Image: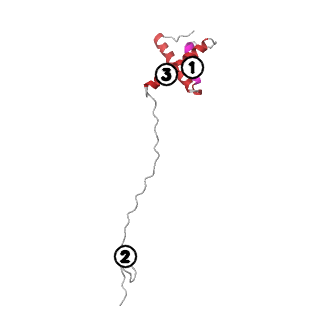
Amino acid sequence: MARTRTASGRFGSSPQTIVVRQAAPVAKKQTRRRSRRRASSGGSSMASFGGDAMAGVAYGLLERMTADMDLPEIPVIGRKGTLALALYLFRKSHPMINDAARAGVIISTYELASEGKITGE
């Protein structure tokens, strides 16, 4: 008797079961989530009031300390504006100087808007 071919293509072997495996899902590449920084507009009002109050105190102390010095004064902006400008130029050296410069600018612009001039000796 002649040998016959089976489904698997081999002579004389018994047919084997065909196993179909499903391909594993491709893992999605993990992307890093970045936190977005928001501009601090508002926030906690008590914290900003405390920071603004400390900035005002620092500006007032610096103004009192420079009252005895012969600090040159810029004619249009006066003594307070000159001090605010000087603090603005040194604002990157310390965060408190930055806050005091902001307080000085606020005080100077308030006086300019309400009285039409910036006061100072």
Q: Position of residue 9 (x, y in %)?
A: 39, 79
Q: Residue at x 49, y 22 (%)?
A: 52
Question: Is disc 1 surrounded by few (<14), some (14 to 19) or many (20+) residues within 10 Å?
Answer: some
Mark 3 or 1: in front is 3
Q: Nearer the viewer, residue 49 or 25?
A: 49
Sequence order check, earlier mark of 3 and 2: 2
Decide: marks 3, 1 in contact (CB < 8 A)? no
Question: Helix, strand, or loop for circle 1?
Answer: helix
Q: Position of residue 53 (x, y in %)?
A: 49, 20
Q: Amino acid at mark 2?
A: Gln
* Bounds of the magenta segment: 76-90
Q: Nearer the viewer, residue 93 or 5?
A: 93
Q: CA distance from mark 3 to mark 1?
A: 18 Å
Task: Locate the N terminus by quadrant.
Answer: bottom left
Write down the residue under mark 3.
Answer: 52
**Residue 16 — which label?**
2
Q: CA distance from mark 1 to mark 2?
A: 90 Å
Write down the residue under mark 1.
Answer: 85
Q: CA distance from mark 3 to mark 2?
A: 83 Å
Above or below residue 108? Residue 29 is: below
Q: Position of residue 97 (x, y in %)?
A: 56, 23
Task: Locate the C terminus by quadrant.
Answer: top right
Q: Amino acid at mark 1?
A: Leu
Sequence order check, earlier mark of 1 and 2: 2
Question: Helix, strand, or loop for circle 3?
Answer: helix
Q: Position of residue 95 (x, y in %)?
A: 55, 27
Q: Amino acid at mark 3?
A: Asp
